Image (spheres, rainbow, N blue to C red):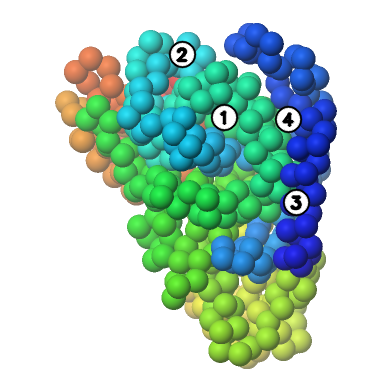
Amino acid sequence: MSEPARRLSYVMAALATTICVSATPTIAQDEYAAPGYGAATYSPATDLRVPADEPRYAAIVIDAASGEILYQKRADSPRYPASITKIMTLYLAFEALSTGRLRETDMITVSPLAASQAPTKLGLRPGDTISVQDAMHAIAVKSANDMAVALSERIGGTESRFAALMTMKAQELGMTHSHFVNANGLPDSRQITSAHDIAILCRAVLRDYPQYYGYFGTESFTYRGVTMNNHNGLLGRMPGVDGFKTGFTNAAGFNLAASAVRDGRRLITVVLGGASGASRNANVEDLLLTGFDVEERRAHGENLILTQNMFEQLPTASVMAEQVNRGDGDEDEDAIDIVLTASEHGTPVSFVPAGVTQLAASRPSLTQDVPHAGLLRPNQAQAPTQAAEPRNWSVQVGEFASGRLATRQIDYVADAFKSLFDDREGQVDHAGRSYRAVFTGFTESEAKQACASVQAKDQPCVAGPR
């Protein structure tokens, strides 16, 4: 869709919201709903879950200034947002700050509902207070589920009312495939979005509240003596990346929205449903690099129309030689197909687009040569997933006298045992005078396997239900 047509569709969506309140998507109601709000306006929500047979992977790359779509794959198909939801939660907080309805120094009282949220969370108790500024940092950096609910209640009165505001704001922004029922992205089959919608939201943050965008680029946050690192692994690693958000649930897969700037140009990339944290990060990085390469070549006069040329049906098996070496002379399609094909099978890619094209033209045995050339790491056999096994186990890898030492241990274990702790939620649990280094989000079998490997290296490790 062209940019003028897309803008027109957004205006029509916003107009429809203004004229006909009854058309606003429904939200979940709970015992915290404010009197006189909810039941009178919203009917019970229908089941909006993503079809089970739909591939989880979706991606989009857009130019932040113009909104032009440089690449998309299933970008308008419904997906579960997981913690990327919190971008909308913070967008509404930024709106409240900009209008004076909220101040960063305001104090929030943590409710029983907020305190009861599942990890990852800051861990405050009912009745505790926290500043708006600290709560927003905890949401952006640690992805704290409890603080997302606490902030939503501070702004909306109740989380369910805030979720209605989220959905209405999504319509206003042109996010036509999004529907929210909670503020943190914890699993709910009715909470859906799309890669395109998340890109629209990221662009809205940059456009409407650039003064607050820095929250998403904060690499670490210290609260009550405990330092927490941002879950976005591209921050501080890929030059130019300066913000946005990760997400993960079993149903959603590994999600990441990222924004980067190079040579005065800014791109937004969203990948939903990645096979692992590592492959998701590598895929986002490669899409950004490819997007910047395309924009630079356009600036030098090349006429590239990627949105029309990049909808090739990707193979359902591993990367095949005939897919890479098509010999059709389209260098951009070769490069992007390698990136997307690899990502759908959980294989990280690292490449320079021109180098891949040259190899494709000169080496018929590319699929055998590429791993040895350092361009594509070979696919590893994946153990069958155990979808029915809950991820409610944690692994404690040490107990220390300070939060700083516990954080250092988390970083060490995450680096030393990457295959076992990849994208797990590392956190410091404070109990009395002890600071425990803990990773969460394991199944029982995964936790026991991880501990056995850590203990084999003479490191402390205890696995148990969370």
Residue at image location 46% in from the left, 13% down from the top: 111
Find numbered disc 2 in the image and state the secondary structure of the residue it sits on: loop
N-term mark: 2 or 3: 3
Q: Looking at the image, which is closer to me, 375 or 448?
A: 375
Instruction: Kindly identify the amino acid type of the residue bearing the numbered disc 4.
Output: Arg
Q: Looking at the image, which is closer to me, 330 or 303?
A: 303
Find numbered disc 3 in the image and state the secondary structure of the residue it sits on: helix
Quadrant hosting residue 403:
top left
What mark, if any, has residue 268 been given in the picture? none
Find numbered disc 4 in the image and state the secondary structure of the residue it sits on: loop
Residue at image location 63% in from the left, 88% down from the top: 302
Instruction: Kindly identify the amino acid type of the residue bearing the numbered disc 3.
Output: Val
Instruction: Kindly identify the amino acid type of the residue bearing the numbered disc 1.
Output: Ala
> Answer yes or no: do the residues labelled 2 and 1 have beta carbons within 8 Å?
no
Residue at image location 63% in from the left, 21% down from the top: 160
Instruction: Give the CA distance from mark 2 to mark 1.
Output: 14 Å
> Which residue is label 3 attached to?
11
Of the two numbered discs 4 and 3 in the rendering, the one whose residue sits closer to the viewer: 3
Which image quadrant: the N terminus?
bottom right
Instruction: Give the CA distance from mark 1 to mark 3.
Output: 25 Å
Instruction: Give the CA distance from mark 1 to mark 4.
Output: 13 Å
> Which residue is label 1 attached to?
183
Instruction: Kindly identify the amino acid type of the residue bearing the numbered disc 2.
Output: Ser
Of the two numbered discs 1 and 4 in the rendering, the one whose residue sits closer to the viewer: 1
> Which residue is label 4 attached to?
190
Of the two numbered discs 1 and 3 in the rendering, the one whose residue sits closer to the viewer: 3
Q: Estimate the x, y position of residue 390 in percent, counting from the top left.
A: 59, 25
